[in-house]
Amino acid sequence: MSDFANRLIVWQKVHGRHDLPWQNTVDPYAIWVSEIMLQQTQVAAVIGYYGKFMQRFPNIATLANATQEEVLQYWSGLGYYSRARNLHNAATTIMDKHHGEFPQDFDTIQTLSGIGRSTAAAIASFAYNQTQTILDGNVKRVLARYFVIEGWPNSPKIERQLWALAEGLLPKQAIVNYTQGLMDLGATLCTRSKPKCGICPLNSDCEAYKQNRVPELPTPKPRTVIPEKSTTMLILLQGDEVMLEKRPPTGIWGGLWSFPEIETIDNNDYESLVHSRFDIVVHASTVFPTLSHTFSHFKLIIRPQVLNVHKMNHSVAAPGKIWLHINDAIGAAIPTPVRKILLSIKSKLITSSPSK
């Protein structure tokens, strides 16, 4: 066993994380759900969602038999919603093609929606004690510093180099402690900012630490200007109810409920637009400040336009549209910015309502 692996295993057994909700189990389903939730999301943000998700969908069959809309509802606010859709699709595949049993073969695991090589390795290691290599963002950072690997870790060339290094470090035993140790080291000591190098079990051989280059590694992603897009969201209010539209199944916020969106119009004649589009007579109401929401590849500037319904043709409650009480809408499968707007509207309604 390499000295790297040995020190990491010893450290993890004493100082690693042992009480996370998805630990201390070999249930591949529970491990799989946690690994998908942890993709691009911090542990602290995942814990609350994980508990509620597992309570509602305790096994593969329950998840597969649920509607995608309900799965998205329990994912609402966690972001990167394609993860939830992939999770649901993969559960259906497991029921249809694998008799409801999560596959053990490493290559087969990677054929499931949303599972790449590193995620498959984590599941195989924790659930089946297989010797497989993980390479998530935390591990890339640890290896880039330990070996002084220059270049953006997600570029194909550098990623291939990191995979080769990670494979060469694999121990022949204690793979669960080793794999968890890599994750724990990157999450708690070898962090992006303010790393705790002084208490790191690998500091005596870490080239970046010895060369005083820890802050500059791993090499940041080349800077690019993030483009901005804008949209106007129409908040149609009828008393305490609001209208939501179902978004297309793919793309940004795919499958979630949201406000109807239009391009911003110069004359602000939203009354005419809403009447022609929905056959609803509205009056312009409260002006809400704009808010922004940043995605991985662009920033969305949202202009909320609140409109009070004066008269409505009830046939507008057509497929793809729904009227919900604001409290129910807040708990539905909606994007985070929509929930922020609804909470603000609810607060204003409470403030403006006459006291009894």
Image: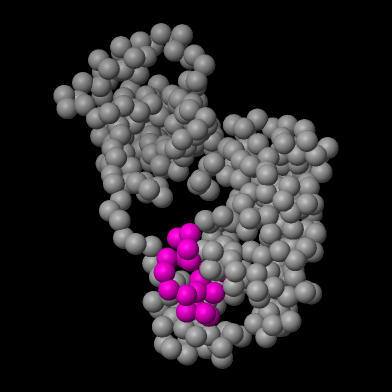
Q: Quadrant of residue 46?
A: bottom right
Asked if residue 218 shows in the view, the reply is: yes
Q: Residue furthest left?
A: 267
Residue 117 among magenta residues:
no
Q: How is the image coloured?
A: one colour
Q: x and y percent of residue 307 in the render?
A: 31, 25
Q: Horizontal placement of 161 versus 58: left or right?
A: left
Q: Is residue 224 left or right of residue 75?
A: left
Image x and y of residue 190, in percent: 52, 76
Q: Quadrant of the C terminus?
A: top left
* Image point (75%, 66%), residue name: 131
Q: Does 340 sit above or below residue 132?
A: above
Q: Residue at x 41, y 50 (%)?
A: 296
Magenta-highlighted stretch: main secondary structure? helix
In the image, which residues are magenta? Answer: 137-158
Residue situated in front as seen by the camera: 326 or 302 = 302
- The answer to whether residue 306 shows anywhere in this view is no
- Above-or-below relation of 325 to 167: above
Instruction: Where is residue 225? Give x, y as percent.
Output: 28, 53
The answer to whether residue 4 is left or right of residue 268 is right
Q: Nearer the viewer, residue 4 or 27?
A: 4
Task: Give percent across and percent down for residue 156.
Answer: 48, 59
Looking at the rendering, in which quadrant would you find the N terminus?
bottom right
Q: Image quadrant of residue 99? A: top right
Which residue is located at x 64 percent, y 64 percent? 134
Whether the magenta-drawn stretch holds residue 140 is answered as yes
The residue under the point 66% across, 65% down is 133
